[in-house]
Image (cartoon, grey):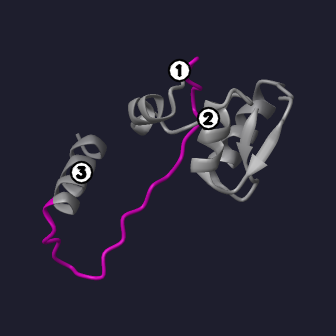
Amino acid sequence: MLLQTTNASLRQSLDQWFDVHRIEPSIVGEVEDMAMLQTLGEHGLGLFAAPTVVRREICRRHRVARVGELDRVRERFYGISVKRRITDPAVRWIADEAKKRLFT
């Protein structure tokens, strides 16, 4: 496995999943940067975990394939704005979609 370093939220969630399922992965690399992790995976150096929300883009860009999904492994994303009112159309769309998915 190619993994992010232990301070990354996805890594912490993966480590918990491995513990629950009593899996001890063979770790071939630990990196800080998700782009580096994906590039190493693209070159066949190991499997890596990535958020499902960007799966298609990662598969297209790095010419990799999804081999499965892990239940209960989560990564959190935060959007922080200094303004009370969101005026940027892209940010507005993201906020609206997040509200729809979280509160419906």
**In terms of depth relative to the viewer, which is nearer, 45 or 17?**
45
Q: Which residues are magenta?
A: 67-89
Left or right: where 76 falls relative to 9: left
Residue at screen point 69% across, 57% down: 32
- 10 Å neighbourhood of mark 2: few (<14), some, or many (≥20)? many
**Residue most toward the bottom?**
82
> Element type at marker 2?
loop
What's the distance in space between the residues labelled 1 and 2, CA to CA? 11 Å
Q: Identify which residue is drawn at 36% across, 71% down.
A: 80
The mark nearer the N terminus, 1 or 2, is 2
> Tag on residue 65?
1
Give, as a three-letter code, the residue at label 2: Ala
| Measured Cα–Cα span from mark 3 to mark 1 | 30 Å
Location of mark 2 (residue): 49
Q: Which residue is mark 3?
A: 99
Image quarter for residue 86?
bottom left
Is 17 in front, or is 7?
7
Q: Is residue 44 left or right of residue 88?
A: right
Residue 20 pos. (x, y %): 76, 30
Q: Are marks 3 and 2 in contact (CB under 8 Å)?
A: no
Q: Is residue 102 rendered to the left or right of residue 60?
A: left
Q: Determine crowd level at label 3: few under 14, some 14-19, many 20+ residues with C-alpha closer than 10 A.
A: few
Image location (x, y in percent) of residue 30: 78, 47
